[in-house]
Amino acid sequence: MSRIAYVNGRYAPHCEAAVHVEDRGYQFSDGVYEVIMVRAGRMVDGNGHLERLGRSLEAVKIDWPMNRRSLEVVIGEVVRRNRLRDGFIYLQVTRGVVRRDHQFPDNIQPSLVMTARRCAVLADSLDDLGVGVITIPDTRWKRCDIKSISLLSNVLSKQEAREAGAYEAWLVDEEGYVTEGASSNAWIVTGAGGLVTRPVGRALLGGVTRQTVLELARGEGVALCERPFTVEEARVAAEAFLTSTTSFIKPVVSIDGVKVGAGRPGPVCASLTALYAAYVKAQGGGE
Ligand code: PDD
């Protein structure tokens, strides 16, 4: 089945969908995006994603391409036209099309692009063997809280991870603290079973999955501490894991080739995965 993309008011076959060469997203990475999980045809954490989209747009002074209600209608239509049951919606808003010039005019119509991807969205259990991460310096700009499409540093970091045989790169600030992964948030579990993850701020993206996992853990009475942690602390943690819309909760079983804990997924990660899977199912209508 050909996939349908949405581009500036039109639904087009994926292979024909295109934007103008002078779209500022293409010329300057002048735009923001969201990746939203769809389960049983419904958005998971839709509010969290659209609220973050609003914060990103405001931070970079791009107007909403349409009001939020209309945007939700377009998302629903992309889901419907692609017969998307389980998968992801990619949504990108750029400043729009205008002759190339760094500064931008006042009344420019933002561009909106949406695509859909089918994919199983849930790992019900931790059959997952866990993944390895490498640690590398965080070379990104100072507004990583904005979900900007300008991802060159993230792309290069992720590629470095792949070339090292790892799943993710954990980015490290100048003081030796982990900010987050190249496309995910980073967590450790202390010997006492408490969760540690860096507090949100300009150094990292406030992940929607991160927020949901925090709330689920809080509801279970798990000890939580939002504070930065160092690479050394992560290496000797009882467990480590990462979270993102597309990775869900992934146990991290090695850091720079050194085993974390027993070198396999641990019990805290397993119970959070089960909680998160139940949450996603419930959001998708309990199917
Ligand atoms: N990335 N940090 C970074 C740098 C990210 O790019 C992402 C998500 C996250 C996790 O955010 P969330 O839980 O809201 O997905 C953290 C998406 C999935 C991507 O770029 O494909």
Image (tube, rainbow, N blue to C red):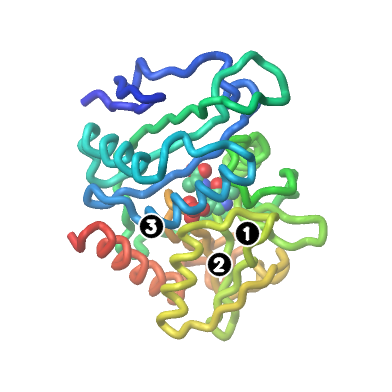
In terms of depth relative to the viewer, which is nearer, 180 or 250?
A: 180
How many neighbours does mark 2 have within 10 angstroms: few (below 14), some (14-19), or many (20 or more)?
many
Which of 89/189 is in front? 89
Q: Is residue 166 visible?
A: no
* Quadrant (top left, top right, bottom left, bottom right) of the C terminus: bottom left
Q: Position of residue 53 (x, y in %)?
A: 50, 47
Q: Nearer the viewer, residue 267 or 71?
A: 71
How many residues crowd mark 1 within 10 Å: few (<14), some (14–19), many (20+)? many
Give the foreground label among 1 and 2: 2
Distance from label 3 to label 2 (Cα)? 24 Å
Q: Is residue 74 left or right of residue 187?
A: left
Mark 2 lies on residue: 240
Q: Residue 94: horizontal and vertical position, in percent?
A: 54, 30
Residue furthest out toward the front: 107
| Other residues around mark 3 within 10 Å, as few (<14) / some (14–19) / many (≥20) | many
Residue that numbered label 3 is attached to: 45
- Disc 3 or disc 1, which is closer to the eye? 3
Q: Percent position (x, y) of residue 54?
A: 51, 48
Q: Quadrant of the N terminus?
A: top left
- Left-right relation of 124 to 7: left
Kind of residue sitting beneath label 2: Ala
* Residue in view at x 57 percent, y 86 percent: 192
Task: Work out which residue is located at the far right of the displayed protein and give it.
Answer: 175
Identify residue for label 1. 255
Q: CB of mark 3 within 8 Å of CB of mark 1?
A: no
Q: CA distance from mark 3 to mark 1?
A: 30 Å
Q: Is residue 282 above or below residue 145?
A: below
Q: Nearer the viewer, mark 3 or mark 2?
A: 3
Badge 3 amino acid: Asp
Q: Earlier in the sequence, mark 3 or mark 2?
A: 3
Q: Pointer 3 and pointer 2: residues touching (CB < 8 Å)?
A: no
